[in-house]
Image (cartoon, rainbow, N blue to C red):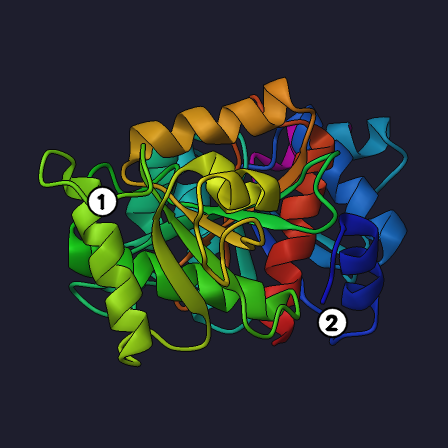
């Protein structure tokens, strides 16, 4: 089991070589991230966008195009940059696609393109999985979905769990413990999230959801604290030991995600799962460190 980002990076270095295609790489923070990844030897890059500005920013951090570790591909606009980056992955020339300084809608439109995109099927679902290392938690904590699916149905929550478990397995967490979150730990018809959480737990026990242990509904304190669970009389293999948190909707996920990052001082990475290759979809507010960790996470998934 990998427990922190230092362990993740060390493990990535032992795996196969992975190339990352960055859509619209003309951004100082992106180039800083590329340098961090190259310095650590965890990936090589296609940098797609307006060539001259990209070359200038590379020079500012002491890098240059060499054709092996860095190759710059010129495009005239953002849509073309997203298309080119996605096609590099689709054609097998790159293994991971990353969003640079480009609107998320433009980037995802390319990822989901029916003709040359990375969507495995017409109804395929994409989900975001955040990986956090909280100062007071002794291992990684995964969170989904905080970025892609506004109000997931029960069936979509099954997919969200399966994707999160896939990421957990890539982090060498063999049988991740999945806590399906709600406001309370009891099932109530007044709170639909509790009913769906209970249904997901039953589906796991009946082997409809595999590769993990699922329980819910669990309030956040019961998911993270064995003491809190004990005080409430909750007997569960997941309570106080969660590896994965599944939120009821995107609003809860987004608030929790930002609470971890900005309130608890967590280090984090994120990856979008469900495409035919890992997708790095970082926020403009994310630090260069978070972008770097996101690349490392996506590379680890591409190595599996």
**What residue do we see at 80% from left, 67% from top?**
11
Whether pointer 1 and pointer 2 mark residues with C-beta atoms closer than 8 Å, the reply is no
Magenta residues?
49-56
**What residue do we see at 34% from left, 53% from top?**
216
The picture places residue 253, in percent across and down from the top left corner, at 39, 34
Q: Is residue 83 above or below residue 61?
A: below
**What residue do we see at 63% from left, 46% from top?**
294
What is the total number of numbered labels drawn onto the structure image? 2
| Most distant residue in the left direction | 189
The picture places residue 174, in percent across and down from the top left corner, at 60, 74
Q: Nearer the viewer, residue 113 or 163?
A: 163
The image quadrant that residue 158 belongs to is bottom left
Q: Residues within 10 Å of mark 2 (few under 14, many from 20)?
A: some
Our reading of the magenta stretch's main secondary structure is helix
| Most distant residue in the bottom direction | 207
Residue annotated with mark 2: 17
The picture places residue 145, in percent across and down from the top left corner, at 37, 44
Q: Nearer the viewer, residue 287 or 48?
A: 287
State yes or no: residue 187 in magenta. no
**What residue do we see at 45% from left, 59% from top?**
236
For residue 104, side relative to residue 200 (left or right): right
Query: Which of the labelled discs sits on residue 194, or is there none?
Result: 1
Quadrant (top left/top right/bottom left/bottom right) for the N terminus: bottom right
For residue 23, side relative to residue 291 (left or right): left
| Most distant residue in the top direction | 263
């Amino acid at each position: 089991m990998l427990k922190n980002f230092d362990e993740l990076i060390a493990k990535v270095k032992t795996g196969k070589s992975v190339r990352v295609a960055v859509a619209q790489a003309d951004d100082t923070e992106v180039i800083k991230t590329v340098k961090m990844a190259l310095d650590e030897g965890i990936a090589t890059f296609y940098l797609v966008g307006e060539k001259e500005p990209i070359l200038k920013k590379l020079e500012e951090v002491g890098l240059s195009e060499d054709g092996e570790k860095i190759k710059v591909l010129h495009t005239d606009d953002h849509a073309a940059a997203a298309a080119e980056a996605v096609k590099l992955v689709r054609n097998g020339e790159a293994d991971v696609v990353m969003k640079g300084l480009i609107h998320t809608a433009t980037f995802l439109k390319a990822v989901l393109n029916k003709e040359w995109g990375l969507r495995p099927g017409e109804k395929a679902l994409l989900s975001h999985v955040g990986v956090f290392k909280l100062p007071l938690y002794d291992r990684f904590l995964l969170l989904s979905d905080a970025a892609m699916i506004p109000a997931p149905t029960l069936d979509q929550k099954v997919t969200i769990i399966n994707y999160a478990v896939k990421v957990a397995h890539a982090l060498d967490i063999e049988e991740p413990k999945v806590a399906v979150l709600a406001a309370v730990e009891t099932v109530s018809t007044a709170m639909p999230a509790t009913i769906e959480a209970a249904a997901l737990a039953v589906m796991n026990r009946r082997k409809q959801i595999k590769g993990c242990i699922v329980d819910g509904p669990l309030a956040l304190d019961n998911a993270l604290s064995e003491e809190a669970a004990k005080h409430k009389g909750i007997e569960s293999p997941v309570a106080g030991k969660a590896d994965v948190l599944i939120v009821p909707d995107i609003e809860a996920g987004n608030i929790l995600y930002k609470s971890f990052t900005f309130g608890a001082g967590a280090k984090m990475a994120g990856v979008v799962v469900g495409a035919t290759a890992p997708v790095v979809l970082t926020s403009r507010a994310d630090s260069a460190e978070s972008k770097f960790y996101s690349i490392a996470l996506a590379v680890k998934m591409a190595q599996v």
